[in-house]
Amino acid sequence: MATYSAAGNQTLTTSAVSALSVGANATTAQRNRIYELWIANEGTPADNLILHTIQRCTALGTSTGVTATPLDKADRAAQAACGENHTVEPTYTSAEEIMEIPLNARATFRWVAAPGGEIVTPATVGSGIGGKALHASATTDWRVGAMWEE
């Protein structure tokens, strides 16, 4: 299977906003196995606790497209659709939060799946995951990255 990487950013607001979505595109529905995620602050760090959520979605929302990078240059282009800086949030699936990470803005978070513990998305158009965050008053920029196989 081919492996890919993509990252996206967003400016934090008082309501949850998504920095990255990864999922099946509109023409080729495929399952993705997400095996690594990372979250970091890009702005001026401060001692703010930011709640980051990785959640399943059924539609990827409206965003700036991100081109996934194949980790092996001999592989085809990624079939997954990726987006950052969402103006319309993904349609998040109720009660399908995969991770909720309260993270200090001065910290970086990295998750790597144990073998067999990857996040698997359904082979349904628009289905995937999104990374969103919120804070009551901080307005810093933050970034979410993912690695997956398809």
Image (spheres, grey):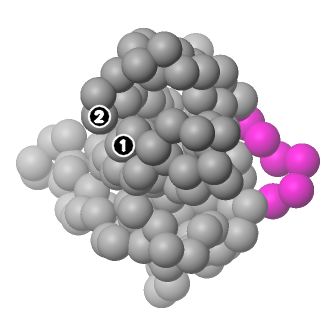
Residue at (10, 48) in percent of width and height? 73
Q: Position of residue 122 (x, y in %)?
A: 68, 59
Residues at discs 1 and 2 in contact (Cβ within 8 Å):
yes
Residue 51 lies in the magenta stretch: no
Judge from the rendering whether residue 81 lies leftward or rightward of residue 18; answer left or right.
left
- Report the front residue among 50 and 67: 50
145 relative to 100 in the view: left or right: left
In this view, 68 is above or below 73: below
Mark 2 lies on a secondary structure that is loop
Crowd band around label 2 with a 10 angstrom C-alpha radius: few (<14), some (14–19), many (20+): some
**Label 1: few (<14), some (14–19) or many (≥20) C-alpha neighbours in 10 Å:** some
Q: Is residue 46 left or right of residue 30?
A: left
Q: Residue 66: tell me if it is visible.
A: yes
Residue at the spot of label 1 = 141
User: Vertically, is 95 above or below 108?
Assistant: below
Q: Position of residue 86 (x, y in %)?
A: 47, 67
Q: Which residue is mark 2?
A: 42
Return the disc, 1 or 2, that comes first in the chain's sequence.
Answer: 2
Residue 108 at what x, y percent from top left?
40, 17
Asked which quadrant contains residue 72, the reply is top left
Give the quadrant of residue 5: top left
Q: Residue at x 24, y 63 (%)?
A: 67
Quadrant housing the N terminus: top left
Name which residue type carries label 1: Asp
* Range of residues picked out in magenta: 93-99
The residue lying at 59 percent from left, 29 percent from top is 50
At horizontal 54% and vertical 21% (from top left) the residue drawn is 48
